[in-house]
Amino acid sequence: MKGSVIITAGGIGTRMGTDLPKQFLEIEGKPILLHCLEKFHSYDPTLEIIITLPTDWIAYWTELLKSFHCEIPHHVSTGGQERFHSIQLALNFCTGEYIMVHDGVRPLVSHETIHRCIEGLNHSKSVIPVLAVKDSLRVLTKDGSAMVDRNDYKLVHTPQCFKSDILKKAYETNYHEGMTDDASVVGLMGIEPLLVNSNEENIKITTKEDLVIASSLLPFSKAK
């Protein structure tokens, strides 16, 4: 079954506090986004890969690939105003029977997690990788806060995986702020996602501290 993956890298890294967008920052001598590109290509060289980038940074990415002698085939799609709009534009280039959507700043996703997401499509039209919550949780109330059962919650990761026709149909709607990920967009069609296990080190790099953590986890991730 032919597949497509959209790697979203439209952010500009304001929380990182650097002039360079976080997807281009390096861990272990290589840009975060390049780690993501290589991870999906190594999982399946036949995957159709689409990367969304801010218009002003597409030329930078092209030169970056040359400097790292990377020739992995992929298409670059112009990013939109919001992540939602970037996905809408990228879907025009997807021809696979299923489509994965992955954060371009999650370079430590494992092949096992990718495989579980794809295999889950044998049982559902929508599949998302999650982790159990380990810490205690409190919910804010008008009087302060209250304990909640952490077993009722999951941490959501990517890649989120969907049957192609379902995802494309879902993105024909209009954007609103409640659309925080692709599963929430597909959920508006009444489709409940199948939850599969993610890998612990599949963190989203958004802060300088995350960079340090990712650098220490990268050797372990490569082994998976």
Image (spheres, grey):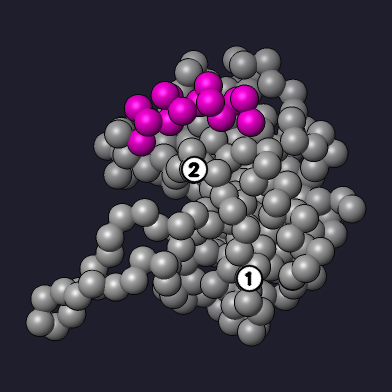
Based on the picture, tell me whether residue 178 belongs to the magenta stretch: no
* First in residue order: circle 1 vs circle 2: 1
Q: Say which residue label 1 marks.
A: 193
Tag 2 secondary structure: loop
Mark 2, Cα crowd under 10 Å, few <14 / some 14-19 / many 20+, is: some
Q: Quadrant of residue 162?
A: bottom right
- The x, y position of residue 103, in whole percent, is 54, 48
Q: Which residues are magenta?
A: 210-224
Residue beneath the point at 57% across and 23% down:
64
Q: Quadrant of the C terminus?
A: top right
Residue beneath the point at 65% across and 68% down:
194
The reply to whether residue 90 is visible in this rendering is no
Side (left or right) of 224 relative to 175: right
- The x, y position of residue 154, in whole percent, is 46, 63
Mark 1, Cα crowd under 10 Å, few <14 / some 14-19 / many 20+, is: many
Residue beneath the point at 63% across and 71% down:
193
- For badge 2, the amino acid type reads Glu
Label annotation for residue 200: 2
Q: Quadrant of residue 145?
A: bottom left
Comparing 180 with 21, the one in front is 180
In this rendering, which labeled residue sits more in front, label 1 or label 2? 2
Residue at mark 1 to residue at mark 2: CA–CA distance: 20 Å
Tag 1 secondary structure: loop
